[in-house]
Amino acid sequence: MTATSKTPLLDLVQEPADLRALPQENLRQLADELRTETIDAVSVTGGHLGAGLGVVELTVALHYVFDTPDDRLIWDVGHQCYPHKILTGRRDRIRTLRMGGGLSGFTKRSESVYDPFGAGHSSTSISAGLGMAVASELKGKKNHVVAVIGDGSMSAGMAYEAMNNAGSTNSRLIVILNDNDMSIAPPVGSMSAYLSRLISSKPYLSLRHLAKDIADQLPRPLRTAARRAEEYARGLVTGGTLFEEMGFYYVGPIDGHNLDHLLPVLQNVRDAEGDKPVLIHVVTKKGKGYAPAEASADKLHAVAKFDVITGAQSKPQSNAPTYTRVFANALIAEAAADPTIVGITAAMPSGTGLDLFGERFPDRCFDVGIAEQHAVTFAAGLATEGYKPFCALYSTFLQRGYDQVIHDVVLQHLPVRFAIDRAGLVGADGASHAGSFDIAYLGCLPDIVLMAAADELELMHMVATSAAIEDRPSALRYPRGEGIGIELPERGSVLEIGKGRIVQEGTKVAILSYGTRLAECRRAAAELGARGLSTTVADARFAKPLDQDLVRRLALEHEVLITIEEGSVGGFGSFVLQYLATAGLLDNGLKIRPMVLPDVFLDHDSPAKQYERTGLNARGIVATALQALGLEAAAVRA
């Protein structure tokens, strides 16, 4: 500890055991220092800020009361885990967040023993926590399991499935409902804190157990009435009726920023010997303690590097619009001409661009919360009534509604349109958000149209094409980030289904691209041309139905055929190979090289470094072509 340190107490904490050695009266100062350190770190790295600021006091209290890592602490989603990382031995690396070789922006089992469950998607914590609690009981252990879940994550059906299961067990599971969508006062004042301490205390629990034993001796109608009267009385006072009905012992709501309220309740629950899981309702304020975050509409949920004093973010300027913005504008243009078009998203209106659509068509835009399964089937229901739903989801979030895609949409041939954002690699967000699998997991389904935009103009055309498809489902994919900066019309044109296009003609090597790697393919073709290797570049546009005429022509007229896609094995390249094999086009010496994402989960890094690692850039494409031709690739230029 130095005299000039802004964080003298935090400097003493290398791990939670050091925190637990501090006097309780020092925790307020420690929390303030932890908030300062979190703000300073994220100003350097960017990342998720508001959620972490909202749980600073809760993080301190949980690690102070519970014996982590023996007691398991699970953070749902992981957006709020930066203060937790600082307290659990990772402060010296906190300014490497989301960078290549640095800390993950989410919890990660391989990173620390204090991260018992990894997450990047929401609503998994209660299920995982229950599994851990049951495992502890089977082992004969007495450790605690604490799952912290936000009110947004509680909109997902999985959370209720887990609570329903947990409520029917005698497991030692503690769920913290972090409610940052509720006013701090007056519901969470001193009276609420007093009641919360009272109902979580041993005397109350013992008295309640005695009352239960007495009630069990009563005739059944009186026994049921007595139990319901007590639980409903508590529910009316504290708002916990729903959770009581699901089998949880409810405590709260309490002020999540007041350590004098938090600590005794957590200690009471820790020391209790109840016979059912407990839910503690904690009210917090997202962005708490940092004025720019508190004043921001999204509480600075996700930020670029920023100035700590002003909160101004240093986002790089680009002349090209993002693909998300292009999608939103294209959908607005289609909806202006067609009143049956509606937009659906699952708690990501700004992430998918549907916030812009909603501003223009508020009655035709639906944010269903973190409920992708519902979003898909809701869209299917709209489609049965003649509407044209565009279900806009990230590629990795659509995974969560996969059964509904198959059973409720594709099996019934319903024309739901899936707009798949964040298709391909996503840089700093890492493996949990990388859209690697949608080509494969949708491509195996019968009678679905799959498209991938090569640039922002193609994306506009594909939005128009999706709107025009009325006899089956369709999906179009596009990546995170900016387009290439080409001129755009007011509205896209409808493409011929299942037809690609030749971008440049050649004779020796053919490169068939599916998606936005097309620009890299053209760079590679220029490099190969400079080496005297005449190269054709084609844009597939469609993975299903595959343009078989185009593939046949490329196979017959070239010595080498390379397919390129921003997806896993089992996707577009596999469809091309299947066709070539069954059509006998592999029988006469064609050299084919499908280029896909490697069969590993890629850690977070800059997009350029990720694509360098995968080989899906001009350098990698040239090297692949030269290798196929048996030529020296050592001198390939970047």
Image: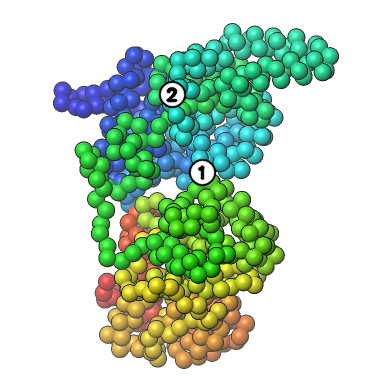
Q: Is residue 13 above or below residue 438?
A: above
Q: Left or right? Give the position of 594 relative to 308.
A: right
Residue 15 shown left or right of residue 419 in the figure: left
Q: Measuring 70% from the left and 65% from the top, which residue is drawn there?
A: 412
* Residue 67 in picture, x, y percent from top left: 46, 23
**Amino acid, disc 1:** Ser
Residue closest to the eye, 51 or 423? 51
- Tag 1: Cα neighbours inside 10 Å, few (<14), some, or many (≥20)? many
Q: Tag on residue 379? A: none
- Residue at left 49%, top 54%? 362
The residue furthest left is 4
Question: Which circle's residue, 2 or 1, is located before the other in the chain?
Answer: 1
Is 54 situated above or below 387?
above
Q: Nearer the viewer, mark 2 or mark 1?
A: 2
Q: Amino acid at mark 2?
A: Ala
Mark 1 lies on residue: 122
Most foreground residue, 218 or 132? 218
Whether residue 336 is visible here, answered yes or no, is: yes
Instruction: Tell me what residue is drawn at x 45 percent, y 33 percent.
Output: 180
Front one among 449 and 387: 387
Residue 2 higher or lower than 575, as above or below: above
Q: Can I make out residue 143 in this image? A: no
The residue tagged 2 is: 185
| Quarter of the figure with the N terminus | top left
SS at circle 1: loop
Place residue 9 in its image quadrant.
top left
